[in-house]
Amino acid sequence: MKTKLIMFEGIPGSGKSTMAHKTALILNKNRIPNNLYREGCLHPANLDGYVVMSPEELEALIQRFPQHTERIRSHHICMDGFMLVQRQKDYRADSQIFRFLEQYAIWDSGLDFELFAKLHRKRWSAFSQNAAVKDETSIFECAFLQDHITELMLFYEKSESEIIEYFKALEETILLLNPFLIYLQQDCVDETIGRISRQRIHEPDGRPWAERVAEMVSESPYGKANALVGYAGMVEFFKRRKDMDLKVLNSLKIRHIFIDNDDYDWKRMQGRVFSVVEEVMGI
């Protein structure tokens, strides 16, 4: 059965973005149709960057911001009576509407957990059904483990068993795509986070990556409950999140492989990834 979904996971700085991009190049070189969905993009499965509102609230939004009517109507999904509106990219230049939509955000907002889980299962299932009939392979960067586990730990404070059950339900939506997950890792989380923190100084929002993420961790319910403060608190969270990543992954049916890069030899890692992708795709 053809693999129609390849996913890259790992903590920040593990090489997900680079290796996902390189994988798309391999598939292109071998004339295998594919789509690469990078972190923060308008995603076919992930709902990060979306808001959820009723049809009445959507109409009220359009009345409040009539200049964005076309954009709003072209970036929304109707699902079980709810309207999901994408806000991540298009409204950054217009802080007024971006701030207004924040109250309806699906992520980092305290949305009812049952609704959060239901919307994501529906979204991933719809993606899977659509992708199954196409002759192409999708490449996801951090949309499966990283984004969901971060949300479930930081903002919903779910236990290990609850998180595993969440993922067992989510994985059922994509098994028909014969997915394969590549987990990139380095043994020393402190060093990996330190490296990426030094690299991501000049971010689009004007704040260093480490400062922004440390604040998110510190101000989250989980961060407050566990006294995860500042840079040290952020590093500790990523250690715990990596541990949760591995526990979840090892409890699922999805085919996967761990690729270590403890010495940060990116060329060697690339060669290993290439070999795995070629084997998975039968190249």
Image: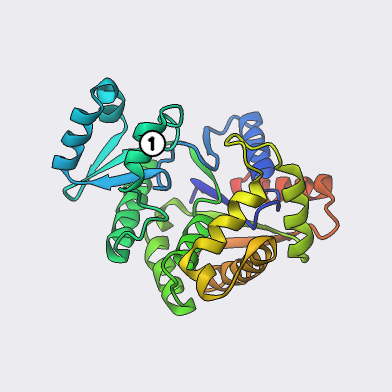
Q: How many marks?
A: 1
Q: Nearer the viewer, residue 274 or 259?
A: 259
The quadrant of the picture occupied by the C terminus is top right
Residue displayed at 59% across by 53% down: 213
Using a 10 Å C-alpha cutoff, classify the residue at mark 1 as few (fewer than 14 neighbours), some (14 to 19) or many (20 or more). some
Where disc 1 sits, the SS reads helix
Q: Residue furthest left?
A: 56
Q: Nearer the viewer, residue 1 or 199?
A: 199
Q: Nearer the viewer, residue 68 or 267?
A: 68
Q: Amino acid at mark 1?
A: Phe
Find residue 25 and report its horizontal and vertical position in percent. 65, 33
Find residue 227 and report its horizontal and vertical position in percent. 58, 73
Find residue 9 and report its horizontal and vertical position in percent. 60, 55
Q: How is the rendered protein coloured?
A: rainbow
Q: Nearer the viewer, residue 89 or 177?
A: 89
In this image, 116 relative to 29: left or right? left
Quarter of the image where one finds residue 88: top left
In this image, 78 relative to 120: left or right? left
Q: Which residue is labeled 1 in the image?
A: 98
Find residue 45 and report its horizontal and vertical position in percent. 40, 46
Residue displayed at 69% across by 41% down: 18
Residue displayed at 41% across by 43% down: 49
Residue displayed at 46% across by 77% down: 159
Quarter of the image where one finds residue 102: top left
Above or below, comparing residue 6 to residue 34 in the picture: below
Above or below, comparing residue 76 to residue 128 in the picture: above
